[in-house]
Image (spheres, rainbow, N blue to C red):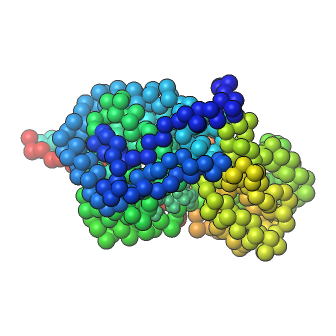
Amino acid sequence: MTSLTRADWEQRAKNLKIEGRAFVHGEYRAAVSGATFECISPVDGRLLGLVASCDLADAELAVADARATFESGVWSRMAPAQRKGVMIRFADLMDQHAEELALLETLDMGKPISDSLGVDVPGASRAIRWSGEAVDKIYDEVAATPHDELGLVTREPVGVVAAIVPWNFPMIMTCWKLGPALATGNSVIVKPSEKSPLSALRLAQLALEAGIPAGVLNVLPGFGHTVGKALALHMDVDTLVFTGSTKIAKQLMIYAGESNMKRVWLEAGGKSANIVFADAPDLKVAAEAAAAAICFNQGEMCTAGSRLLVERSIKDQFMPMVVEAMQGWKAGHSLDPDTKVGALVDAGHLSAVLGYIDAGHADQATLLCGGKRTLEETGGQYVEPTIFDNAHNAMRIAQEEIFGPVLTVIAFDSTEEAIQIANDSIYGLAAAIWTSNLSKAHLAAKALRVGSMWVNQYDGGDMTAPFGGYKQSGNGRDKSLHAFDKYTEIKATWIKL
Ligand code: NAD
Ligand code: MN
């Protein structure tokens, strides 16, 4: 896909222009207060630049601008077919700037450059393109009224949307929100994570270049407790969409209740069970998928297969296969095109992950591989992919989201026990089962309380299917036409004939 070497990427990184200012009404500008914070790369510790530290004053400006732009109709009343054209141009521009966007993403949050280029940029542009393509193909409804009445059921954009997003897939998470929000005519304020603000700031300029009018997409970098909180409490934000931790998701519901009852849609954490039955069609394939499920994106995945549940009768045969598969997922320098596991997002997160490894030891789970920080000489934040066997579901490493490449293995004896363990979690984001038995697959899939269910695979998904969680993993769905529900109000209009 790319023939660029690590040296090429290093060279480009040196010449890369870093824009850290906020983006309001089509222009970059410093925070009202003038405050900035340092953006440090977890890849090697280099200072990438200074980023605007926005707060309440910036939120006031951006919300007022987004509101005025929405009311002007310049975007909200543009014909859907025309909005579609602009969205497709935006997606095309993202693809044309793929290498620059990928480099920004990798330098900012540490994921392997090959993933940024092969997964994140195409995933993000697809979300924009798919949503844009859909918007002139959706019809409203006519109610089944008596003969002398007409009942119209129409969808309208909600108005001003605030999107607070995390750092693990900065561009993709931003675009899962932006796609349906923009396609349906809203004005949007994006608050990227303070750990990964750079790609969203660049996207805003590409959106403007594509023809999305100034004020329709504003980006406010800064911290959660300052600008994030200001947006969540704002009386003129109609809808708040969020991806991030369950802890903050709960707080956002409180903010909405304390302010204007804005709609709140949440994609939060997970502790997904990957259940391997003795009758799995191919244990080697299952073992490879189990390793990928915890190592891809450094395990910084809401859907990470972080609990591996293995039927006891095959466990001695299966676990060496998983350990072997993990050898293919060594941590490496994030700018090396062959690297599959890059740097964790920052030093604080690395120490949190190492803290969970300590907890695994303290609870006397059995370390099968990994367990240590690595590549310290790079100045970056790397950890070895790690497996703890002989765990049980009450351990901290089985209940809490580690958000790193640390796999917790639990044995089970029956289908009922596997389902009971899998559902014994505050989360309900995803699960996988591996079996050749059709009835068992369907019955288990029904019994597992999760938003995404995989059978004989891990992590399937696409823009065409909804994504989101049960229980404390969130509410509502991103992706697919179901996502449009978050960004539209339904109006019933009655006409007497
Ligand atoms: P986080 O909750 O700490 O932060 C998410 C965002 O919320 C950031 O932009 C942050 O600045 C902001 N924020 C923090 N405090 C805030 C406050 N008081 N008011 C308003 N905004 C505030 O999460 P994170 O560490 O960035 O991301 C990791 C989490 O995201 C994990 O729990 C992971 O499971 C979850 N996640 C979920 C999905 C999903 O789709 N379900 C996808 C990716 C990540
Ligand atoms: Mn960063």
**Which residue is the extreme one toward the left?**
497
Residue 115 image-quadrant placement: top right
Which is nearer the eye, 388 or 108?
Answer: 108
Which is nearer the eye, 298 or 36?
Answer: 36
* Residue 55 placement (x, y as % from top left): 35, 60
For the C terminus, give its image quadrant.
top left
Q: Residue at x 86, y 54 (%)?
A: 319
For the N terminus, give its image quadrant.
top right
Q: In this rendering, is residue 240 above or below 130? A: below
* Residue 231 placement (x, y as % from top left): 34, 59
472 horizontally vs 45: left or right: left
* Residue 314 placement (x, y as % from top left): 88, 55
Q: In this rendering, is residue 251 above or below 94? A: below
Residue 265 image-quadrant placement: bottom left
Q: Residue at x 44, y 42 (%)?
A: 19
Residue 77 image-quadrant placement: top left
* Residue 462 placement (x, y as % from top left): 55, 38
Q: In this rendering, is residue 293 above or below 349? A: above
**Which residue is the extreme one toward the right?**
317
Q: Residue at x 75, y 66 (%)?
A: 357
Mark yes or no: residue 373 visible. yes
Q: Residue at x 71, y 43 (%)?
A: 333
Mark yes or no: residue 123 visible. no
2 horizontally vs 247: left or right: right
340 horizontally vs 145: left or right: right
Which is nearer the eye, 115 or 185?
Answer: 115
Q: In this rendering, is residue 368 above or below 255? A: above
Which is nearer the eye, 392 or 400?
Answer: 400
Number of marks drawn: 0
